[in-house]
Image (spheres, rainbow, N blue to C red):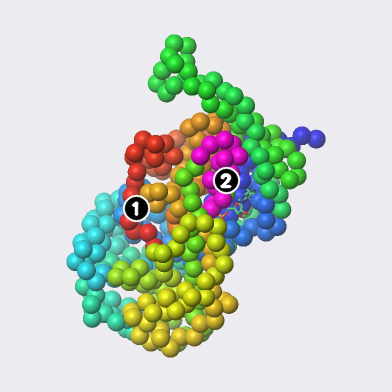
Amino acid sequence: MIETADVVIIGSGIVGSSVAYHLAEQGCTNVLVIEREAHQGKGSTGKSMGGVRAQFSTPVNIQMSRYSIEFFSRFDEVVGHPADYRAHGYLFCATSERHLDYLKANRERQLALGVHNVELVTRQDIAKFVPQLRVDDILGGTFCPTDGFVDPHSVMMGFMTHARERGVRLWLDTQVTGIEVEPALTGTAGVSPAHGPRTTTSRITGVMTTRGRVSTPIVVNAAGPWAAGVARLAGTELPVEPLRRQLVPTEPFAGLPQRFPMVIDMSTGFHFRREGKGILLAWNDPDETPGFKTDFDPGFVEKILTRAADRVPSLAEAEVNPRRAWAGLYEMTPDHHAIIGPAPDVSGLYFVNGFSGHGVMHSPASGRITADLILQGNSKLIDAAQLSVDRFAAGRLLEETAVL
Ligand SMILES: Cc1cc2nc3c(=O)[nH]c(=O)nc-3n(C[C@H](O)[C@H](O)[C@H](O)COP(=O)(O)OP(=O)(O)OC[C@H]3O[C@@H](n4cnc5c(N)ncnc54)[C@H](O)[C@@H]3O)c2cc1C
């Protein structure tokens, strides 16, 4: 029997699962999700810190966060599965006038786009949130109480379980090894195909997998850090690069409050939050270079503890077991924004890639936008053309500077 699907999604991480959920919600259920691992969540989703925030600098990221955070706040009721959304807030701390001005300008943009609860906070306010913080050089900051954390694995499972209950199929332990295309003649945009010059592109006819061929007119690339390789299977290029990120949990640590926001020290980029009885420490090493490196570097512990103890002196006493630390991959694009939408040269191929550190928090919006584009050709949520891969060739980059 020949397998067929209206849509094939490659990758069952949080993004592919959200696309499946949103397609099913819009009545498109003849969908097959293909995952090469035996379990979901083995890619970036299972490595994430789970942070969600509306405090971004560009309108499109703020809009995607606004939709997504509102979605997370209703997730358990709507999806029927826990997201474990904890609205503990994000607290950005500035130690220079330049950073403070940047936070103030971002806040104006966030307010204008309907995120009304971002507050400017003083050094004294910050000390009240986390009395153990060294605040002598802090000039002020911003705090948004509806920023916080989710459980990425639970969100992913919730999206997929709900989609499967509506008829979506999931093949685990199956790798997509090829994408079949056939030539298709199309007119150059804006020119009548009958009279204007023609460009030759291709269109999707199916995928080859380790379980056989599947016939489909639509393929969604939700392959996370492996997205560029999947795009190449269809003969097209995607500017997405893997970049290692490392997280260090402490052993149980009572020297900080039981509940406090994600704290971001803008002087170094060091940030931390509570994770159970311990503290989860994060810092993006500027010396990291692109590549598929997922081994944890034990030398990173000293680097991060130096930054941690500088901001929270009591963290110098925290115990760390390097074997409990881990590394995963961000999927970086040149302008640190996602790429969402149709491939310009392969009809039927859709990208939902390159989240540059924000794929968990933006998963509700990205699934919804992708489903809208496949089924309606546009999305009411945002002007999706901004996120199209065309922007790189056209020089319309969207630089996001609030990358953690
Ligand atoms: C250390 C770390 C911390 C992070 N912290 C945050 C955070 O606080 N907040 C936030 O929003 N984001 C965070 N991120 C980023 C976030 O985790 C990712 O953006 C997100 O998980 C991407 O989801 P995805 O579904 O696109 O990719 P993935 O979860 O990687 O899923 C892609 C899937 O595709 C499958 N696949 C690939 N190729 C094929 C193939 N040929 N055939 C079949 N299957 C295939 C893979 O096996 C994988 O399961 C963090 C990432 C890391 C590494």
**Helix, strand or loop under label 1:** loop
Closer to us: 201 or 25: 201
The residue indicated by pointer 2 is: 229
One can see residue 48 in this view: yes
Quadrant where the image shows the C terminus: bottom left
Instruction: Give x and y (percent) for residue 84.
Output: 52, 66
Q: Is residue 194 left or right of residue 96?
A: right
Which residue was labeled with disc 1?
A: 400
The structure residue drawn at horizontal position 58% and vertical position 58%, both measured from the top left corner, is: 43
What secondary structure is found at the residue carrying circle 2? helix
Task: Choose between 114 and 154: the one closer to the eye.
Answer: 154
Residue at x 42%, y 36% (from the top left corner) = 390
Residue type at mark 1: give it: Glu
For label 1, count other residues whose C-alpha is less than 10 Å away and answer few (under 14), some (14-19) or many (20+).
some
Left or right of 288, for residue 349? right
* Highlighted range, magenta: 224-237
Q: Compare residues 208 and 299 and report the one nearer the observer.
A: 299
> Residue at horizontal 40%, vertical 52%?
336
- Give whichever of discs 2 and 1 has the lower sequence position: 2
Quarter residue 313 falls in: bottom left
Question: Which x, y percent locates residue 180?
Answer: 65, 33
Residue sitting farthest toward the left:
97
Q: Is residue 59 above or below residue 147?
A: above
Look at the numbered disc 2 and say if its residue's Cβ is closer than 8 Å to ligand 1.
yes
Amino acid at dot 2 = Gly
Q: Position of residue 29 (x, y in %)?
A: 63, 41
Residue 72: x and y, percent? 47, 58
Q: Give the distance between the C-alpha atoms of the residues marked 2 and 1, in whole angstroms.
A: 25 Å
